[in-house]
């Protein structure tokens, strides 16, 4: 069994990696939506996702450097789950209002899932910097989810 500091460092690194991969996924989806969304509001939302997740990822990277954790290069994050690949295919093949609905539903679900995971991760974190990082990111994630829900209600069925 590893000493507690090694185990806690591994947990902290895993939390940062989780946020980093989520940021990369949202940036990628946001860029796709900037190009494919049919609604101006959805394109603006996608642009905000890209900006906010890029900023959040810079905080994640800085925190990782401070605690000595290594994050995988985003190009190496291609070990996508079957679900992530399926979502990517759904987004790639969708167009117009259908794309907007799929994109908004997916980002809403992704943000909800990430917030639930980060609530638990915050309890598991043994580093004040990571707790502070999660505290900074959570309201942004909540805002993204809320906005996706609002936009879904506006989108034509």
Image (tube, rainbow, N blue to C red):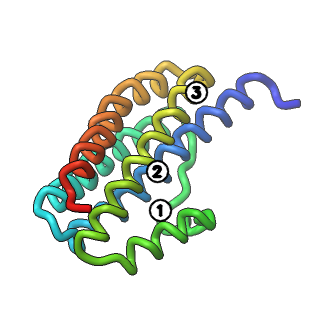
Question: Real-space Cα distance between discs 3 and 1?
Answer: 24 Å
Q: Are marks 2 and 3 in contact (CB under 8 Å)?
A: no
For the C terminus, the image quarter is bottom left
Pinpoint residue 68: horizontal percent, then vertical percent: 55, 38
Residue position marked by numbered label 3 in the rendering: 120
Q: Mark 2 or mark 3: name the one nearer the start of the chain.
A: 2
Q: Which mark is residue 74?
A: 1
Q: Which mark is residue 97?
A: none
Residue position marked by numbered label 2 in the rendering: 22
Choose between 153 and 129: the one closer to the eye: 153
Pinpoint residue 28: horizontal percent, then vertical percent: 36, 64
Q: Mark 2 or mark 1: name the one nearer the start of the chain.
A: 2
Is 83 left, or right, of 46 in this rendering?
Answer: right
Q: Are marks 2 and 1 in contact (CB under 8 Å)?
A: no
Q: The residue tagged with tag 3: helix, strand or loop?
A: helix
Q: Give the farthest residue toward the left.
A: 40
Counting other residues with Cα less than 10 Å from the Cα at mark 1, is it few (<14), some (14-19), or many (20 or more)? Answer: few
Residue at 39% across, 71% down: 91
Counting other residues with Cα less than 10 Å from the Cα at mark 2, is it few (<14), some (14-19), or many (20 or more)? Answer: some
Examine the rendered structure and indicate whether residue 65 appears above or below residue 26: above
């Amino acid at each position: 069994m590893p000493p507690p500091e090694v185990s806690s460092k591994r947990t902290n690194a895993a939390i940062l990696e989780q946020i980093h991969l989520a940021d990369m996924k949202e940036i990628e989806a946001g860029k796709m939506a900037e190009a494919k969304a049919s609604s101006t509001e959805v394109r603006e939302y996608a642009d905000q996702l890209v900006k906010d997740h890029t900023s959040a990822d810079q905080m994640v990277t800085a925190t990782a450097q401070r605690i000595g954790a290594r994050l995988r290069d985003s190009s190496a994050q291609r070990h996508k789950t079957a679900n992530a690949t399926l979502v990517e295919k759904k987004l790639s093949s969708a167009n117009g209002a259908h794309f907007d609905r799929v994109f908004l539903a997916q980002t809403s679900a992704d943000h909800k899932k990430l917030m639930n995971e980060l609530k638990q991760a915050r309890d598991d974190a043994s580093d004040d910097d990571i707790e502070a990082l999660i505290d900074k990111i959570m309201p942004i994630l909540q805002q993204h989810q809320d906005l996706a829900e609002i936009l879904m209600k506006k989108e034509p069925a």
